[in-house]
Amino acid sequence: MRLRRRLQRLRRWALILLVVASGLIALINNWVINNSESYVYSSWTLLPDNDVGLVLGTSPLTRGGGPNPQFYGRIQAAVELYRNGKIKHIIVSGANPDSTYNEPRQMRRDLIKAGVPKEAITMDFAGFRTLDSVARARAVFGLDNITIITQAYHAYRAVFIAKKLHIGVAAYAVPGEDISVYTRTYWREVFARVKAVLDLYVLQTAPRFLGKPVALDGSEGSEGSEATNTDPQTE
């Protein structure tokens, strides 16, 4: 009897904790979205002009090995904004953990194939997380205003971070289907928003790597500017 009562109490407290945690997660997600949604644009014609667009990195391939529509959607959106004069320069920011995987270089290649001049592209190899990419826009590139280019679900978090870091921001939500609540990506983003709030308001997390300031004039070589010397690859 005593053991049964203890188990019942444990179940009751576990249920209470689950309900409280779920409520906090929902509240934080609503806060991030409501705080950011007026800065996220689905039409490029309504998007404010900015000198620099920040393309946030993701894998060019899906988990199944096929082309990732999110990656190529961001590339197409950046090209569209550049051609229509909404941005004049593009930072491609992402991860490059080893010699077989380099998001910024792949983004740069595809942008050039689509007609964007190489001198209008800067590679940021230290965009390990969204927080790093956005924080470095100001700390490394000295930008007070940016246009973030990514899917809508991701844009809310990126805008939320930029606002907290006092960066003037607008985001272009890449056209296409939004992610389903039943996908791994959806739930990963739900918890990423919670982590972003903790990083900004509790942990005060800094970017993993900063380095020296970088000018966005393409003067650092034929491949355009590189934000760090952390790229392990050569072409």
Image (cartoon, grey):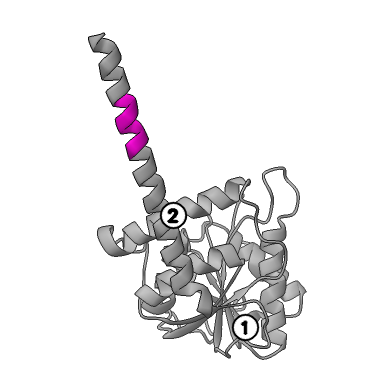
**Residue interval drawn in magenta:** 10-16
Return the residue at label 1: 119
The Cα atoms of the two marked residues, 2 and 1, are separated by 43 Å
Residue at 76% from the left image edge and 73% from the top image edge? 113
Three-letter amino acid code at the position of disc 1: Glu
**Closer to the camera, 4 or 125?**
4
In the image, is residue 11 part of the stretch drawn in magenta?
yes
Return the residue at label 2: 26
Is residue 76 left or right of 50 when viewed as pictured? right
Position of residue 23 measured from the top left corner of the image (x, y, whole percent): 39, 50
Residue at 53% from the left image edge and 62% from the top image edge? 94
Is residue 216 left or right of 177 when viewed as pictured? left
Q: Name which of mark 2 and mark 1 comes first in the sequence.
A: 2
Q: Is residue 120 visible?
A: yes
> Measured along the vertical axis of the image, is residue 224 above or below residue 65?
below
Q: Is residue 99 visible?
A: no
